[in-house]
Image: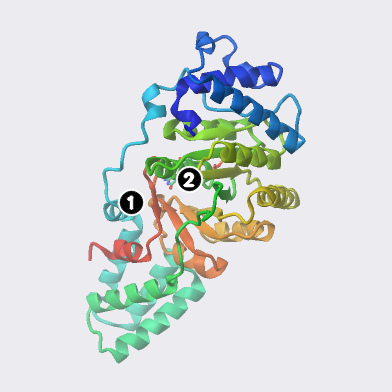
Amino acid sequence: MEFLFESPELLIALVVGAAGLVGGVGLARRRSDETDTTAPPQDATDVATREMSIEEIREVSGDTGSTDVLDLPEVPDTPAELLEEPPPAPTLTPRERFRQRLSRTRNVLGASVADLFGRGITDEAWDGLEEALISADVGVTATLEIVEDLKRRSREEGVVTAEGVVALLKQELRDALGSTDRSLGRADDEGPTVWLVTGVNGTGKTTTIGKLAAVEQREQRQVVLAAADTFRAAAAEQLGIWAERTGAALVRKDEGADPASVAFEGYAAANEREADLLIVDTAGRLHNKRELMDELGKVKRVLEKQAGPLEETLLVLDATTGQNGISQARAFLEAVEVTGIALTKLDGSSKGGIVVAVQRELGLPVKLVGLGEEIDDLAPFDPDLFVDGLFEQL
Ligand SMILES: Nc1nc2c(ncn2[C@@H]2O[C@H](COP(=O)(O)OP(=O)(O)OP(=O)(O)O)[C@@H](O)[C@H]2O)c(=O)[nH]1
């Protein structure tokens, strides 16, 4: 089956058909006065099938209110080439990107270690290393353990140079990050893979989802985004912009709708279109923890009822919030079983050690890192590349 978003004409036809179904509310509000709505469908049979499916989705969800919308990004404002072409390939290799984007952390950690031990392996140098690691957000307990280990190993191995200490430190950091599986889960049977994305607002959830959609669409995997953050209309709009940029489809409802029903319809739409991947965005307001937990738990339960166990439940954390971010994360861990961390804004932080602290304190693998605001600024987390990146200038 053709993916709906790859054919603007088909999209327009769906918009017209679906607007009729919901009595002019929702979709009609977006397209009613545009001349493009009169464009004839290229494939009338396909459109008819889609109309029925949408109706079925509404029946099954028991959510037949007039505000329900199976929405897609604005067609007339979207240049055709954006819809038809996958996003262009990134120009930097992952190593180059890491190197470039980790410059702030590198300057703090890498440069200070070289400086400290440049004058010999002294007690002051070890104290200075402790401070540098704590400043880089490695965390106090982890820092003390790492430095103790380093002292012992450098004695045993007769290390006398700064380069020698750096080599051991790299090994220690690498060991602290462990060798867990960091790949993103995918469905091995029929039906779309589902990734549920959670985290405090402002951590970079929506941006991370957009970047993920770009990677997936570029690899010819068809993506549906579900805007289950219905707390703010702007959240769905922001996700819509990413859908337009990446060529993914978008399922959304009006502000205040039940997030679980958006997730439900998202899965139904992804399934019906034989999409490869559904990514569900969620709200992350923390002012009422009980409400948040109930809401997230319900979204997950509803999805699992349809799809079975989810392939990923990702928690997005902002690297610049340090220990505070880790405490906030715990609220989410109580609400849903998280399978991995996406650590954003690593480019804007001089505290790359947070990767070690996050893994250690939350007991979860960092699977993705955000290295900037642009579409290509997301990388699978590679511990070797990361640790090398921290010290590359040395
Ligand atoms: N420097 C940098 N900025 C990022 C990164 N990821 C996201 N941002 C920025 O962080 C801000 C918040 O990102 P959003 O994606 O809107 O965060 P959210 O968690 O979805 O928050 P809400 O939109 O409030 O729900 C935006 O300005 C993003 O451009 C990153 O890896 N590095």
Residue visible at 64% across and 18% down? 19
Q: Which mark is drawn over residue 101?
A: 1
Q: Position of residue 122 (x, y in %)?
A: 30, 83
Residue visible at 46% across and 22% down? 8
For the rendered model, the colour scheme is: rainbow
Residue visible at 53% across and 59% down? 340
Q: Nearer the viewer, residue 224 or 242?
A: 224
- Mark 1 to mark 2: distance in Å? 16 Å
Examine the rendering and report whether any part of residue 280 can be seen. Answer: yes
Q: Position of residue 259 (x, y in %)?
A: 68, 40
- Badge 1 marks a residue whose secondary structure is helix
Instruction: Looking at the image, tell me whether mark 1 or mark 2 is earlier in sequence order.
Output: 1
In this rendering, would 180 be left or right of 376? right
Q: Position of residue 186 (x, y in %)?
A: 50, 54
Q: Position of residue 332 (x, y in %)?
A: 64, 56
Residue visible at 58% across and 44% down? 280
